[in-house]
Amino acid sequence: DSYFENLQATADKVYTYGSASYSAVAVVSKIPVDASGDEYVPFLELLHVDPKSQGLGRENLMLKKIKDDYPGLVWCQNNFDNASRLAAESFADGLAKTSDKKTFAWYGNIDYKA
């Protein structure tokens, strides 16, 4: 499976900001926590703001909307550009680095079930 096919299969919600320009986009997917697939953790796959729109607060607006919709969320800081990573980090309750140097962050209740 390609990344985009997998993303399409697991995407829970797609957020966009900015009328027709789509100057910001975020994708939250469902990551199964057990083999049954009945329980999952919401995972922020993508948070991207067009470089021309960075620094205008769009990252924070997107993250506030996501936080309203999800009581807990996990993401990999390494998946974001600098502006998005810094904005997301400001929402984190915790950070953890893996042995392969990936940094995961989370906020809230991550024992989430659909």
Image: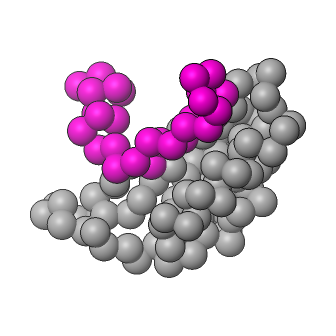
The answer to whether 35 is drawn above or below residue 18 in the figure is below
The extreme left residue here reads: 36
Percent position of residue 58, x then y: 74, 42
Residue at x 49%, y 64% (from the top left corner) = 69
In this picture, residue 68 sits left or right of residue 91: left
Q: Is residue 54 left or right of residue 65?
A: right
- Give the x, y percent position of residue 53: 78, 28
Closer-to-camera residue (82/66): 66
| Residue occupying image coordinates x 80% and y 32% | 54
Q: How is the image coloured?
A: one colour
Q: Is residue 63 above or below residue 4?
A: below
Whether residue 99 is visible to the viewer of this picture, yes or no, is: no
Instruction: Please give the range of residues in magenta.
Output: 1-28
Q: Is residue 32 left or right of residue 79?
A: left
Query: Total marks drawn?
Result: 0
Is residue 87 among what the camera can see? yes
Residue 77 inside the magenta-drawn segment: no
Residue 10 counted in the magenta span = yes
Query: Which part of the image, by quadrant, shows the C terminus?
Result: bottom left
Picture residue at 86% right of the left edge, 37% below the top: 55
For residue 67, which quarter of the picture?
bottom right
Residue visible at 68% across and 71% down in the picture: 93
Q: Given the current orientation, which residue lies at the most extreme front position?
A: 19
Q: Does residue 31 lie above or below 110 as drawn?
A: above
**Residue reaching furthest right?**
55
The quadrant of the image that shows the N terminus is top left
Give how far across and how far down residue 70 sits, in percent. Answer: 48, 66
